[in-house]
Image (cartoon, rainbow, N blue to C red):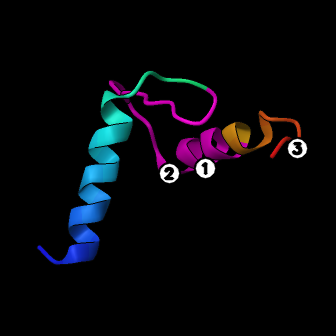
Amino acid sequence: MNHDNTYLLKQLEHWINAKEGENVEFKEAKNKFGFDDLCEYCSALANEGGGKR
């Protein structure tokens, strides 16, 4: 694993172990969850902040 992958893995582990909040949200797709559904969900999350940065 190179340096970049190590950093990314550590960052992902940090997010997984952190409390969910405005910037991080994990979901589990237990049933059918197609690509179009994923795109709609990502778009909704992106628009959720109302333009806040």
The kind of residue tagged 1 is Cys
Q: Residue at x 28, y 74 (%)?
A: 4
Query: Compared to 35, does 16 lie above or below?
Result: above
- Identify which residue, 28 or 24, lies in the foreground: 24
Quadrant for the N terminus, please. Answer: bottom left
The kind of residue tagged 2 is Phe
Percent x, y for residue 27?
Answer: 43, 28
The residue tagged 1 is 39
Number of other residues with Cα within 10 Å of mark 1, as a class: few under 14, some 14 to 19, many 20 or more = few
The residue tagged 2 is 35
- Pair 1/3: label in front: 3
Which sits earlier in the primary sequence, circle 2 or circle 3?
Answer: 2
Contact (Cβ within 8 Å) of mark 2 with mark 3: no
- Identify which residue, 45 or 37, lies in the foreground: 45
Which sits earlier in the primary sequence, circle 1 or circle 3?
Answer: 1
- Identify which residue, 49 or 32, lies in the foreground: 49
Q: Residue at x 67, y 38 (%)?
A: 45
- What residue range appears in magenta? 22-43
